[in-house]
Image (spheres, helix red, strand yellow):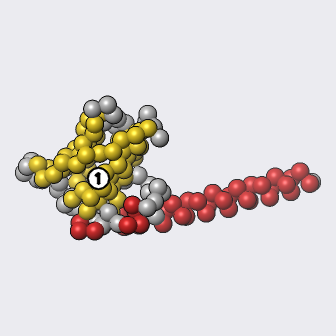
Amino acid sequence: MKKTAVIAVCILTLLLLCSCGAKEQNNMNTTTQATTAAQSVTVVNGVQDADIWLLPHTEENLKTTVWGKATAPQFKAGESRSVPLCESGENGKYLLRMIDTDHFYYSTNGIALKAGDTLCVTGDNITGVTAKVTDVSGAVVATYEVFAARL
């Protein structure tokens, strides 16, 4: 009987701990990602299979490493995908965060994106990674250097 009680207490404690972590993660700026299909960009992953986050460029997001659910999870290398835009941060800017299957972390700040734009992340960890934004007509709007390092 004691053994059953101890197991029950352990399971309840584990459930409480897991539910607290999930609630905290869901509160981290993912609530603003409710968008319509018209508020999306096309993302092209030219690097590695990765999870990708497009976050508002805010002071809070610059200081955290908890980004919530990936905006584009399990994004294959060479794949192109429509990704919803959340509300932008300062001056209509976004943060790009990626973690690939080889445990590399990619980051760039201050990306100017509008609905209909294309964000193409290309390069490799040796020669460098860049993020290029093109508008709906295909004209290059901006190019950003992407920080890449192994976790």
Quadrant containing the N terminus in the rendered view: bottom right
Q: Residue at x 36, y 41 (%)?
A: 148
Residue under pointer 1: 83
Q: Is residue 74 visible?
A: no
The mark total stands at 1
Among the 4 quarters of the image, the one containing residue 93: bottom left
Question: Residue 108: horizontal and vertical position, in percent?
Answer: 31, 51
**Which of the 4 image quadrants contains residue 147?**
top left
* Apparent side of residue 102 relative to residue 81 in the rendered image (left or right): right
The three-letter amino acid code for the residue at tag 1 is: Val
Farthest residue in the top direction?
A: 126
Above or below for 124 versus 35: above
Query: Horizontal and vertical percent for residue 110?
Result: 26, 58
- Look at the numbered disc 1 and give the secondary structure of its residue: strand
Answer with left or right where residue 7 lies relative to residue 18: right
Looking at the image, residue 48 lies above or below residue 72 = above
Q: Residue at 48%, 57% (x, y): give it.
A: 66
Is residue 127 left or right of 10 when viewed as pictured?
Answer: left
Q: Nearer the viewer, residue 20 or 2?
A: 20
Mark 1 crowd level (few <14, some 14–19, many ≥20, 10 Å Cα) = many
Q: Is residue 4 above or below residue 49?
A: below
The residue under the point 80% across, 56% down is 8
Regarding residue 82, the answer to whether it shows in the image is yes
Residue at horizontal 23 percent and vertical 66 percent from the top: 92
Residue 130 coordinates in the image, percent (x, y): 24, 42
Q: Nearer the viewer, residue 147 or 136?
A: 147
Lateral position of residue 131 relative to residue 63, left or right: left
